[in-house]
Image (cartoon, rainbow, N blue to C red):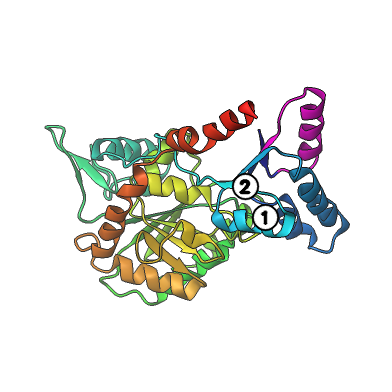
Amino acid sequence: MLQNPPTIPTFVVAWFVSVVRSSQLVIDWHNYGYTILALKLGFRHPLVSISKWVEKIFGRFAVANICVTNAMRQDLIRNWQISATTVYDRPPDIFKPTSLQEQHELFVRLSLVYPVFQARPPSQNTTRFTCCSSEGTVMKLATRPVLLVSSTSWTEDEDFKILLDALQDYEEKATDDTPQILCVITGKGPQKEMYMEKIASQTWKKVEFCLPWLTAEDYPLLLGSADIGVCLHNSSSGLDLPMKVVDMFGCGLPVCAVRFNCIEELVKDDENGLLFDNSNQLADHLQDLLRGFPEKLDKLERYRGNLKAFQEHRWEEQWQVKVLPLFQEERTN
């Protein structure tokens, strides 16, 4: 089984091995490799054309194909005559809502490294978001800021400037009642340093930033502790879905996401999150969703409630129900 992308040289190598070993090739289409390559080189570059040709020709050699959206399934059959089965990504069990006790323990750990998570003023058994009584009962602080989380690869297909401009707009429109935001951005990539400099060059009163390095265990705990997620992923093909939103939904976290061709196969506008086309729309969404924080969060709570059905289905189930039967069918042919 081959996941695409990457395309070159994996498509050719996997096909060659399948021929030599008399095995069957199955392709898991997550996106088109040539569209990702085109982000850097442009669609007219010869290497992009070669990559597209390799995907189209060698993709037809697979005995079975799965893809991540109905839009991609339709595109494969329409343009490349490749028949595929749609298998939506679902989160593993580790992505789930975080208990108050786990939230407090996470914030304590993070406060040792990142001062923005420390209580103000510093206090024993208290973090910026939670406090633990002498009896061991954990409570959320009424004075806590909004915990906004975004995960980015800091690359061309995720325009971080949209979030930065939206938060600047949030600042400019803020009143005394506007809630404070702690914006936590995870991930690493080529544009990270550039945006860190931009953040540092601006004056912020209502927004703080933290760009932590999280362990694989702490990342889902953070998602399950957050109030709102933001996804800046803009599909290179317009046919794939952001796995980071799948993980956020697994944790019961509502998301504001960039609108593109097939995103509504995952993010249902005003049902489990909101979609936006530009920074102004994102700023308006944040103002609307966070008004009255932390006492009044009607929309966010409604979105969380609507995510419960999504959380009932995990990747293990998808594999058993959707993918495994494909392998069993091909073995009998």
Residue segment shown in magenta: 6-27
Tell me the tag on residue 77.
1
Numbered marks: total: 2
| Above or below, 98 relative to 199 | above
- Residue at the location (48% across, 34% down)? 216
Quarter of the image containing the C terminus? top right
The reply to whether discs 2 and 1 touch (Cβ–Cβ < 8 Å) is: yes
Q: Is residue 124 among the parts visible in the rendering?
A: no
Could you tell me residue 265's position as x and y percent? 48, 58
Residue 220 drawn at (x, y percent): 41, 40
The three-letter code of the residue at mark 2 reads Ala
Check residue 54 for magenta coloring. no
Q: Residue at x 61, y 58 (%)?
A: 74
What is the x, y in percent for residue 303?
31, 58
Horizontal side, residue 305 vs residue 83: left or right:
left
Residue sitting nearer the eye, 2 or 93 = 2
From where the camera sits, is residue 169 visible? yes
For the point 39% across and 34% down, the residue is 93
The local secondary structure at tag 2 comes to loop
